[in-house]
Amino acid sequence: MSEERFREKSDEELVRDAVRKDEEAFSELVRRYQNRAVAVAVGIVGNRDDALDVVQEAFLKAYRSLRNFHFDSKFYTWFYRILVNQAIDRVRESSRRGVSFDETWMKEDGEAGLPRSDYRTPPDEAAERKEMSAVIKEAIESLPEHHRTVIVLREIEGLRYEEIAAVMGISIGTVMSRLHYARERLREKLSGYVRGER
Amino acid sequence: MNCREVREKFELVEMGGAGHGEAEEVRRHLASCRECSAYVEDVKRTGELLRQFVSEEVEKVPENAVLSRVEASIREEREKKIFPRFLTRLAPVIVGLLALAAVMFYSSIEEKPSRVASFDVTVESVEAVNATVVLVNKGEDSPKVIWIIEREET
């Protein structure tokens, strides 16, 4: 019922409603962006548990600072800036604590270390997929945070260069240069999969 | 335009963000440079692998998991605003003080002397020189014994 009430409204109208203490309006914004935000966060932090924490915290920060949104940019550009900063902070925090990808993987899936969905797939295929995911994850983790963020916003979220530039507060030239660097690095790390050698 | 420039700009060309002349130059280079056209293919395949990896992770997240967490956090924050933490900590002290105030209030009411409007005197028993006399206050809703005189003692 309440979802229908908001369907026709733009993000900016929802922000106005939410500022007037209409909490359902803010819930609608969360509903609109939650999956995309999780995808971006997974791409940057590398695992879904941390990604969920990051997205939750980003939405909360956005909620607390709705009054600071001056409608001079799109809501999602503003929100993604909060999200990306939150994710980068999490990556740095994890590096300081020395948490590796393997630890988070084992923590959620137990001894087998397999993603849950793979329990139903044939063992060979599951093992291959697991190996590939691990290689991709390692490749992403090998990128500095800002390069990682640029490639995630481009490849996962499909943002245009000017949107990435607005989210990250950098020039389009820097976006292109970081993308190039990140792609070269990933291409090298994933060469076996990229060229179909595996 | 060298290979690095072409590799940085090919996507901008695809998105229609480059000028006509620049776009033409990039296209010409890609048509003649095998390494750069292989690079473009690799970039597309890398993008697919990233999307595949992320979508597998995202699929495992229950629907509206984020929404539930965010709504719960907002509710919690609102409650904290209504009952700031220091008030929550002081709650037992406040309850104790209120209870003490209540006890003092009611005991002060009990201590007020009651005015006797009228009373009945009944002689309960008479034995030789001893008698039990009872004064009963009739001024209240229910009769109340206010004095018993027994064997010349009160």
Image (cartoon, coloured by chain):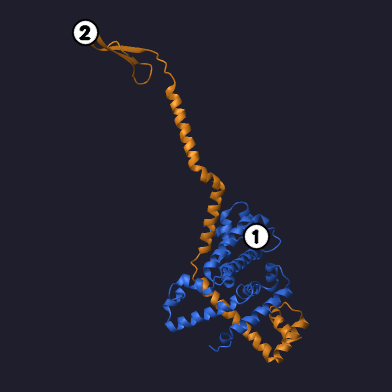
Residue where numbered disc 1 is placed: A12
Residue A106 seen by the camera: yes
Residue A7 seen by the camera: no
Q: Residues within 10 Å of mark 2 (few under 14, many from 20)?
A: few
Badges 2 and 1, same chain: no
| Chain bearing mark 1 | A
- Up the image or down, B70 lies above or below A35; here it is above
Label 2 to label 1: alpha-carbon separation: 102 Å
Q: Residue at x 63, y 74 (%)?
A: A148
Which label lies toward us, 2 or 1? 2
Residues at discs 2 and 1 in contact (Cβ within 8 Å): no
The percent position of residue A43, horizontal first and vertical second, equals 58, 73
Give the secondary structure at mark 1.
Answer: helix
Chain colored blue: A
The percent position of residue B42, horizontal first and vertical second, equals 62, 85
Residue where numbered disc 2 is placed: B128
- Up the image or down, A167 lies above or below A138; here it is above
Amino acid identity at mark 2? Ala
Chain B colour as displayed:
orange
Amino acid identity at mark 1? Glu
